[in-house]
């Protein structure tokens, strides 16, 4: 410890002793004088009371006559506690007793003094000696109390001097903060800890727990080092440092708060590592136990992340250097995001236990929807698998080599297909049952068809597109199928090779040159998984065998790649895939279904009471041409001064393929459905084109069953001019018609319609925008909410999206979400529809 600091400590101790002695002496003197005054006053009061008691009757007789003249005046001006009158008016009785403590904090005190003075004068005129002595005693009491109050004021002032003024003088006099030393010993450590904390939170937010742990630990070490220096400085001095104009002193003032955050951050990093170690380095034979440990440490990490967020809120960003203020705000946001994401991640881990059969065997229908041939819920359902899971392990894997067509022989009912499917077949089958974009509706329909085709009951349906497989192959690396096919499949050649193997029969007659180097094989693949492909039945026609082979190989390799180093990549694949609806989940268990719906993994058409749009393409007899299709969606909303809204939607579909190219170089034949707000009125339509009627020569037979939802579609209102169907589905109005695009061409479809609601209509009382409006402006009644939700079609490639909202000139935007939403008299948005999108504003009319 430096001499300067020793001197300061010595002087500080002396000063404190001196001040303490002064305060004690002052308090003792005040108490002594108060006791003396009180004793004198008490003796005189007792003596006066005795004299008054002896002369009371005599006084009453002497003053009765003269007092009657003053009685009326006293009744009007003196409070009842100063004067009591007997019921007998002939014998008025004065009560001169005064309750000083009742009046000393009361606004009546001054009025009482005035009245007492007047009464004293009356008593003097009446020559009542005891009364004058009594009032003189009261005066003595008041003087003593005033003196006590003065002493108390002096004492309060001294305390203020000690706590505030004196330390400031000492801080200046002794120069306790040697800024250069402080910067070297504390600030540099605090800044380093801050930087590490920022990096750690960012890494943890991205689920990169390995990097996060290292950064968290480094931050903790820096904080501990800084703490050793800070412990020598009292909290009161740090508090005063915050009042300084020196930015380095202000940062030091926040250092101990950073210490607390650092300790929590270190614990957070440790728990994250323990959680991931439990999952990846635990007992692989006991999946349930490993998952339990993951959830345990994960919940501890969630609690740490919440505490970290609270501690960071205690830090005043204004006390940080300018170059750190913006970073700190970013850190606080990241900590908040980390807390939410981590909680969701651990919550999903808890539910994962049930999904993967930790407590009960599960059986799922896994469907492969080929989005190169788009269908409403993702793509043509050419292949599927039946998966039995127990305690996280696959106990049975059935992938029929004939794909979905293997279900045809077991179908025991005949069902009429939706009318557009009559283009290929009026009889509805399992492979065409994924008709609706609302995944829960489609999943239930798939289970129904599967059971009617002699399939077992399942606990849920999971959908995967080739897009997901391509991304997984980037993680697993190439899959060696040389023994069975003479091929190695990776993310770059996956689609082309698999499609050619699957479509060998068709390509042999149309494009035989495309099959060069593509072998046909019925060799059973060697796999550690319990794979069944039903190869003994119709072994000559198993075009989808390669799907099962490839799936088995990926499932063998992927668990070995599931480690801490690859966790971020694997999570990124699934997060992106689920946002794009390339992976969809449906569970019969309502608790599990609610969980996936909460995370937006359920592929639901969402309810909204404002503007809405969803464009759904269904490829019917257009082969794999959707792989070469691009789409631009333009949504224009025009609001009139009376509040009426007219929307115009322009959809530009472009075929980038080359004519006659195998699988993709054919006409894209599309049943286009546009989902808009319920009750919308179609005004204009252009660009639709239907296939020739001769292709619809086959019709369902009257005896066939008809699905209720399909019946609604078949009985839809038809626009006479364009042939566009108009019906309701999932609380939306649907406009549906045909679009055909040849390779190298583009088609523009235009729909103009009036919304059923008025812009000026107030939102329902439970609408969150209304609640936000009331919160932001409790006194403003003229703020009007408006929003647009655009949902992405499951399985589709991201479309280019443009939206423009046009408002009257005198309707300024008061609030918007997101914050950067901008545009002249409304908004103008250019975005990529890679997930569901949402925009909202509040208008001040």
Image (cartoon, helix red, strand yellow):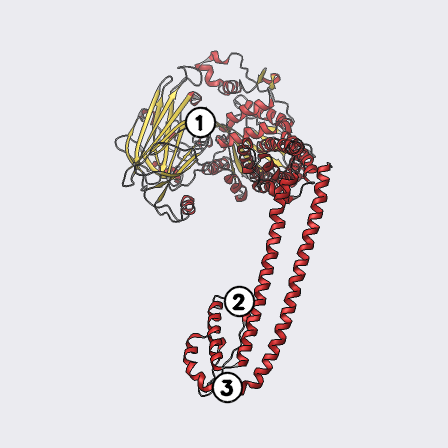
Q: Are marks 1 and 3 in contact (CB under 8 Å)?
A: no
Who comes first in sequence, dot 3 or dot 2?
A: 3
Q: CA distance from mark 1 to mark 2?
A: 79 Å
The mark found on residue 104 in the picture is: 2
Q: Residue at x 57, y 74 (%)?
A: 137
Q: Position of residue 393 (x, y in %)?
A: 64, 34
Where residue 146 sits, quadrant-wise, is bottom right
Residue 60, label in figure: 3
Please name whichever residue, 603 or 75, is drawn nearer the observer in this view of the structure.
75
Q: Is residue 139 left or right of residue 831?
A: right
State if disc 2 and disc 3 touch (CB < 8 Å): no
Compared with 667, 795 (above or below) is below
Residue 225: image location, x then y, percent: 69, 34
Give the residue at x 32% y 43%.
760
Q: Secondary structure at mark 2?
A: loop
Give the left or right position of residue 391, taking residue 546 as reference.
right
Q: Which residue shows up at 66% across the image and 43% down it?
A: 234
Viewport quadrant of the C terminus: top left
Question: Foreground: 28 or 551?
Answer: 28
Q: Secondary structure at mark 3?
A: helix
Look at the numbered discs 1 and 2 and tell me whether their residues touch, using CB distance below 8 Å: no
| Most foreground residue, 37 or 726 | 37
Few, some or many C-alpha atoms within 10 Å of disc 2 (few <14, some 14-19, many ≥20)?
Answer: few
Of callouts 1 and 2, the N-terminal one: 2
Label 1, label 3: how many angstroms apart (C-alpha)? 106 Å
Residue on which disc 1 sits: 798
Q: Is residue 125 above or below residue 550?
A: below
């Amino acid at each position: 410890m430096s001499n300067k600091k020793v001197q300061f400590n010595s002087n500080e101790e002396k000063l404190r002793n001196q001040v303490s002695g002064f305060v004690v002496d002052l308090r003792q003197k005040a108490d002594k004088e108060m006791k003396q005054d009180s004793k004198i006053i008490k003796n005189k009061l007792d003596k006066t009371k005795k004299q008054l008691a002896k002369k009371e009757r005599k006084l009453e007789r002497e003053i009765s006559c003269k007092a009657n003249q003053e009685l009326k005046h006293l009744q009007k001006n003196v409070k009842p506690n100063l004067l009591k009158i007997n019921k007998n008016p002939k014998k008025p009785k004065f009560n001169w007793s005064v309750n000083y403590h009742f009046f000393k904090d009361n606004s009546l005190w001054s009025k009482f003094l005035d009245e007492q003075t007047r009464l004293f004068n009356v008593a003097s005129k009446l020559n009542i000696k005891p009364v004058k002595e009594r009032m003189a005693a009261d005066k003595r009491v008041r003087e003593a109390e005033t003196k006590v109050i003065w002493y108390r004021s002096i004492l309060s002032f001294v305390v203020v001097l000690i706590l505030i003024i004196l330390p400031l003088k000492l801080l200046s006099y002794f120069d306790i903060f040697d800024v250069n030393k402080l910067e070297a010993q504390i600030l540099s450590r605090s800044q380093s800890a801050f930087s590490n904390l920022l990096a750690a939170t960012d890494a943890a937010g991205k689920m990169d727990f390995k990097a996060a742990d290292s950064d968290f630990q480094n931050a903790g070490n820096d904080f501990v080092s800084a703490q050793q220096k800070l412990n020598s400085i009292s909290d009161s001095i740090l508090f005063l440092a915050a009042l300084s104009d020196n930015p380095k002193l202000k940062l030091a003032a926040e250092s101990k708060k950073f210490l607390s955050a650092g300790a929590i951050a270190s614990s957070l990093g440790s728990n994250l590592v323990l959680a991931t170690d439990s999952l990846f380095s635990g007992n692989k034979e006991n999946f349930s136990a490993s998952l339990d440990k993951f959830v345990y440490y994960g919940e501890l990490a969630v609690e740490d992340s919440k505490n970290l967020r609270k501690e960071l809120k205690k830090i005043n960003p204004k006390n940080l250097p300018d170059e750190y203020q913006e970073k700190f705000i970013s850190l606080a946001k990241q900590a908040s995001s980390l807390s939410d994401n981590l909680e969701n991640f651990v919550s999903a881990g808890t539910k994962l236990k049930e999904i993967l059969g930790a407590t009960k065997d599960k059986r799922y229908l896994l469907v492969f929807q080929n989005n190169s041939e788009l269908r409403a819920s993702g793509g043509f359902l050419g292949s599927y698998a039946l998966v039995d899971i127990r305690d996280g392990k696959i106990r049975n894997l059935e992938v029929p080599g004939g794909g979905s067509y293997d279900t045809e022989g077991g179908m025991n009912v005949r069902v009429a297909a939706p009318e557009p499917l009559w283009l290929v077949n009026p009889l509805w089958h399992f492979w065409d049952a994924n008709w609706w974009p609302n995944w829960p509706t489609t999943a239930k329909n798939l289970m129904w068809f599967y059971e009617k085709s002699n399939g077992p009951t399942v606990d849920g349906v999971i959908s995967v597109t080739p897009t997901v497989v391509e991304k997984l192959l980037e993680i697993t690396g190439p899959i060696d199928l040389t023994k069975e096919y003479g091929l190695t499949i990776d993310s770059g050649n996956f689609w082309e090779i698999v499609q050619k193997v699957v479509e060998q029969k068709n390509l042999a007659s149309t494009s035989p040159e495309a099959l060069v180097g593509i072998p046909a094989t019925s060799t059973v693949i060697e796999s550690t998984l319990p794979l069944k492909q039903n190869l003994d039945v119709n072994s000559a026609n198993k075009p989808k065998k390669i799907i099962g082979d490839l799936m088995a190989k990926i499932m063998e390799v992927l668990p070995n790649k599931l480690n801490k180093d690859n966790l971020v990549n694997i999570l990124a694949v699934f997060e992106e895939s689920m946002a794009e609806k390339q992976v969809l989940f449906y569970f019969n268990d309502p608790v599990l279904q609610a969980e996936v719906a909460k995370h937006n993994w359920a592929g639901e058409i969402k309810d909204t009471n404002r503007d809405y749009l969803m464009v759904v393409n269904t490829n019917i007899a257009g082969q794999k041409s959707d792989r070469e299709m691009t789409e631009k969606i333009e949504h224009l909303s025009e609001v009139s001064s009376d509040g009426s809204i007219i929307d115009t939607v322009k959809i530009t579909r472009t075929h980038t393929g080359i004519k006659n190219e195998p699988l993709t170089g054919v006409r894209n034949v599309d049943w286009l459905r546009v989902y808009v707000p319920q009750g919308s009125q179609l005004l204009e339509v252009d660009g639709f084109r239907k296939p020739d009627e001769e292709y619809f020569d086959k019709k369902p037979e009257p005896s066939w069953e008809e699905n209720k939802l399909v019946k609604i579609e078949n009985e839809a209102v038809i626009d006479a001019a364009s042939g566009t169907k108009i019906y309701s589905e999932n609380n939306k109005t649907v406009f549906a018609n045909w679009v055909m695009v040849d390779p190298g061409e583009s088609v523009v479809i235009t729909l103009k319609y009036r919304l059923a609601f008025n812009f000026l209509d107030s939102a329902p009382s439970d609408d969150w925008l209304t609640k936000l409006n009331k919160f932001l402006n409790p006194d403003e009644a003229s703020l009007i909410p408006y929003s647009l939700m655009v949902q992405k079609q499951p399985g589709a490639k991201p479309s280019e999206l443009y939206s423009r909202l046009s408002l009257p000139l005198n309707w300024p935007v008061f609030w918007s979400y997101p914050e950067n939403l901008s545009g002249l008299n409304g908004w103008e948005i250019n975005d990529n529809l890679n997930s569901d999108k949402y925009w909202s504003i509040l208008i001040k009319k």
